[in-house]
Image (spheres, rainbow, N blue to C red):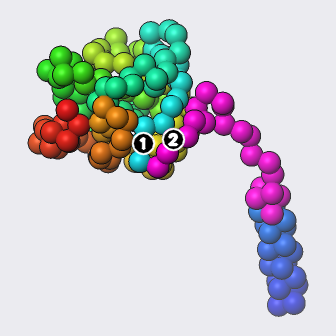
Amino acid sequence: MTKPQLHLAVLAVALIAGAIGFWFATREQPALPPAATATAAPGSRPEFTLASVEGPQRSSAEFAGKPVIVNFWATWCAPCRREIPLLNRLQAEHASEGLQIVGIALDTQENVQAYQQEVPLSYVSLYGELDAIAVGKAFGLDLYGLPVSVFTDRNGRIVAVHTGELTEADAAGYLAKIL
């Protein structure tokens, strides 16, 4: 291939790649499911509804007036799995103070149910793939890494967001702010 032919070939590949990129960039994206597109005032817990592992849909309105820890996790996430015993213990120890932990799995119902056969969750367990991501966005989160725990007080104000595995010391500090 001569030098001019090589330049033409490179130009042709670049034009084709650009056309394909333009096509992908201008395609209409599917809308997120309406159950998970709720928004809230900045700094407050959004209203949302997600499927429950136990069966029926659950609404965040059920937790009004309670301090809530919303924990975004996934069955394939090792740090998420390691913190579940701590979350189970916190739910048991602080339920009398009104604390409600809500686990939101960025996963399928089948995966979450199978995991909970091994390690039961003693708190509300919700799931959804795109729906769960939309709830995270309603909290103002990008969820690039898991786990992420959002601590809200009785008035629904977001007091803290913790990214990464929660430790006993982390939890104690956050709980002092919301209970």
Q: Quadrant of residue 102?
A: top left
Query: What residue is at 45 percent from the left and 25 percent from the top?
Result: 60
Measuring from the top left, give residue 80's x and y in whole percent.
31, 35
- Quadrant where the N terminus sits is bottom right
Residue type, label 2: Ala
Query: What residue is at 31 percent from the left and 18 percent from the top?
Result: 123
Magenta stretch in the rendered image: 22-42
The relative height of residue 159 versus residue 67 in the rendered view (above or below) is below
User: Residues under labels 1 and 2: Cα distance?
Assistant: 6 Å
Measuring from the top left, give residue 42's x and y in whole percent.
47, 49
Q: Report the front residue among 107 and 58.
A: 58
- Quadrant where the C terminus sits is top left
Measuring from the top left, give residue 103's x and y in whole percent.
37, 27
Q: Which residue bears the numbered disc 2?
A: 40
The relative height of residue 113 versus residue 34 in the rendered view (above or below) is above
Q: Which residue bears the numbered disc 1?
A: 44
> Helix or strand or loop: what does disc 2 sit on?
loop
